[in-house]
Image (cartoon, helix red, strand yellow):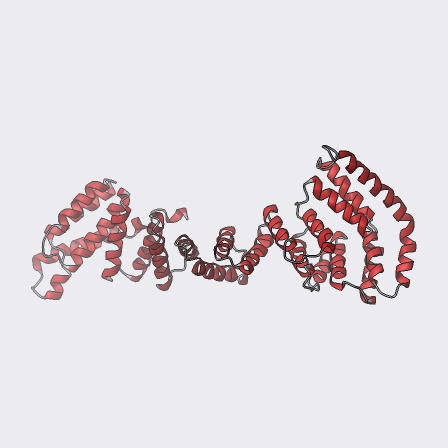
Amino acid sequence: MNRHRFPWRELVAGAALVALIPAATLAQTADTKADTKAETVRPEVAKPLIAAEELITAKKFQEALVKVREAEAIADRTPIENYVIERTRGVAAAGAGDMPTTVKALEAVVASGRAPPAEQLRMAEALALTYFRMADYPKAAAWAARYAKDGGTDPQLRVLRAKSLYLADDYATAATELRAMVDADEKAGTPPTLEKLQLLASSYIKQKDTAGYVFVLDKLLAYYPKKEYWADAIRRVESRPGFPEYLLLDVLRLQEATGNLTSGAQYTAMAQLALKAGFPAEAKRVIEQGFASGALGTGADAELQRKLRDTATKQVVEDEKLLAQNARDAGAAKDGGALVTVGYAMVSAGQFDKGLALMEQGIEKGGINRPDEARLHLAIAYLAAGQKAKAIVAFRTVQGSDGTADLARLWLIHAQRSSS
């Protein structure tokens, strides 16, 4: 918002004042009618104000304020004289860095109702920005609201109002404002700024609004997918009450996909769970990745980790010999669960076409104990095979209250940003 650094200078700059000051000549020829007198700037008032304007042009702001006070000291000032005095005082005080005097002067100008509508709007903007700089957040919010009410359309002023509300501890109103902005941005096809989303997230946190925070976290993942946001989102799913152990491997898979599989304990756990689930190729790939990254192979557990790698390597060889027979046995089973498992094992071994066909066949056959988990695995398999469009459709079909739907929601966000 640097372009608003000194907005008040445009409000009372030279030409605007010069247009008013010549009214001083009216005092020499005007009749005594009250309305004419009210619109008169007398020479004794005009003289120090013109001098003040010249000092402002020369950037001698403190000296300009002295001249303004000289004009103010003259008795029986007319409304137009007070108006010009406050306009001049506003720009001189702003140049001098006297923010309290600046806002007081500008508020007096606005209250007079004499400035044209466009100028009134700029003054409301200046007041909002100046009060924000002064850390008077309630007044900054009020003037930003006045700016919008009077027809102002600068989106930065709307953000400033939301920030002011937040800093004034009015988190609920700030969240309402920010949520409306985020919704409007998305409706217009424009990604919400990181600033808006972070401020909205914090507003929800301050209110302990978990649902609101999760909403924003999903938006942050969609538009600004930092590892930290993914870690937070995955942790929230995994730590929900009653989260089942059978989904822990899927949690680790999502951590791997989003760059959050980093520790030796994570690599080891994922490899062990993959072996237990019947996916040795996945286990071998993960443990080799752990060794390559340096997370495995050193420290007190290095020997156990090497043994785990040897076990995975041996089981991959054995599994390759049995996959075809396993597929035939799965096809003869009453339900489709075994087909899904064998199909995923083939996918993890790089046999994408055969594996996906078996998984699809198993889901169509039905009778699966946990059908949403099966659909989640099919969607992950599609993504692994580079079939992004099918993966997106499949993730959207996953339901369930055990955590599969939450994982599928996060996988969907990841898939939509994936280049596969």
Relative placement, left or right, of 94 versus 291 is left
Q: Quadrant of residue 67?
A: top left
Residue name at image x 77 percent, y 53 percent: 385
* Residue 322, horizontal then vertical, whole percent: 91, 51
Q: Quadrant of residue 289?
A: top right
Front position in the image: 416 or 154: 416
Q: Is residue 114 visible?
A: no
Relative placement, left or right, of 163 versus 285 is left
* Residue 195, horizontal then vertical, whole percent: 49, 51
Q: Is residue 92 visible?
A: yes
What is the total number of numbered labels drawn onto the structure image?
A: 0
Q: Quadrant of residue 404?
A: bottom right
Relative placement, left or right, of 2 versus 238 is left
Front position in the image: 144 or 249: 249
* Residue positioned most to the top: 299
Front position in the image: 159 or 315: 315
* Residue 188, horizontal then vertical, whole percent: 53, 61
The answer to whether 102 is drawn above or below residue 358 in the figure is: above
Relative placement, left or right, of 188 versus 301 is left
Front position in the image: 82 or 414: 414
* Residue 370, horizontal then vertical, whole percent: 76, 62
